[in-house]
Image (cartoon, rainbow, N blue to C red):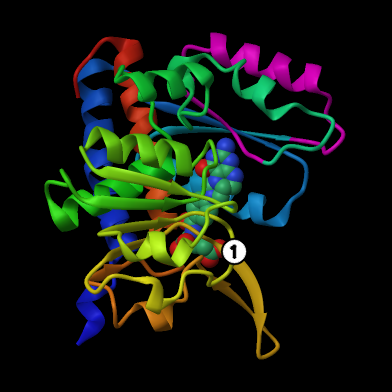
Amino acid sequence: MSEQKIIDGKAFAAKLRTKIAAQVAVAKSKHGFTPGLAVVLVGEDPASKVYVRNKGEQTKEAGMASFEYKLPESTSQAELLALIDKLNKDAAVHGILVQLPLPKQIDSQAVINAIDPDKDVDGFHVVNAGRLATGGKGLVPCTPFGCLLLLKDLLGDLAGKHAVVIGRSNIVGKPMAQLLLNESCTVTIAHSKTRDLPGEVRRADIVVAAVGRPEMVKGDWLKEGAVVIDVGINRIERDGKGKLVGDCDFQSCLPKVSAITPVPGGVGPMTIALLLNNTLIAAARQKGVEL
Ligand SMILES: Nc1nc(=O)c2c([nH]1)NC[C@@H]1CN(c3ccc(C(=O)N[C@@H](CCC(=O)O)C(=O)O)cc3)C=[N+]21
């Protein structure tokens, strides 16, 4: 019964990648260029290595060029900045992603702000954050962009809906709130100091959970028929086994919602699809073509 309530982010992302691959083919055949994405990984974090590998594989599957840079944990900030300078100047590279988090000797924000904003396919550069906040044409962070596409596919026009975003990070919460505001939602941003979080969430037509706390949002916090987008990816131990769970308690939320994203298979695959989409957008703009 509730099967159709579960949003299939994996299938949506696969469809999106098919569309992107078709546009990449046009870029090659009609305009004579191959969109290229450079991914930079510093150090040995095992989860980061998996993401970087998935990104590389899906980039190539879409027909794009993938450039991977794996630097040692001991890399200095100056060395990383030198690589970014080289990638900024490389005409075959249209998008640059530096995997976060970075080792502690490196100032992440300084590194992000060294990327050419027009190649900043993560949308994390202060210029892109400013463009999003002021209605300019920039690059939008992949995870919130993916969440927005899922919401619009499900609900159509979002105007007037009450959205509660839980979490205020620069990479998800804040840009998500900006995007929902641009869609004329009434937006509440909740965080660790919010008084009566369940009470705030109970007013929401749309809940976006991005706090990084396993299974924090409970079903009895939700308004009947709410749409829940769960951005959390938390690795926990249960019954002696490793398990991936979101920021929402899926079992108690499912009966209350009209739709909910699962973890895994929800927002995660969308993030990578939107990264490819941003790379395509960045490449088309750099080449001055419409795809
Ligand atoms: N500069 C930067 N940009 C990022 O976008 C970025 C980053 N750094 N650092 C790490 C996080 C994490 N992240 C994920 C992307 C896809 C999945 C994903 O596809 N997850 C699948 C599989 C999860 C699994 O099985 O491990 C799913 O949710 O179904 C997860 C996590 C991007 N990140």
Farthest residue toward the left? 157
Is residue 94 in the magenta section? yes
Q: Is residue 69 above or below residue 4?
A: above
Say which residue appears at 29% left-offset and 66% top-offset.
8
Q: Is residue 90 left or right of residue 164?
A: right
Query: Measured from the top left, where is residue 78 in percent x and y?
Result: 80, 16
Farthest residue toward the bottom? 239
Q: Quadrant of residue 291?
A: top left
Say which residue appears at 55% left-offset and 13% top-offset.
88
Farthest residue toward the front? 195
Farthest residue toward the right? 74
Q: Is residue 190 above or below residue 249?
A: above
Say which residue appears at 73% left-offset and 22% top-offset.
80
- Magenta region, residue range: 71-100
Say which residue appears at 34% left-offset and 41% top-offset.
145
For badge 1, the amino acid type reads: Arg
Identify the residue position indicated by label 1 in the image.
213
Q: Quadrant of residue 268?
A: bottom left
Q: Is residue 154 above or below residue 104?
A: below
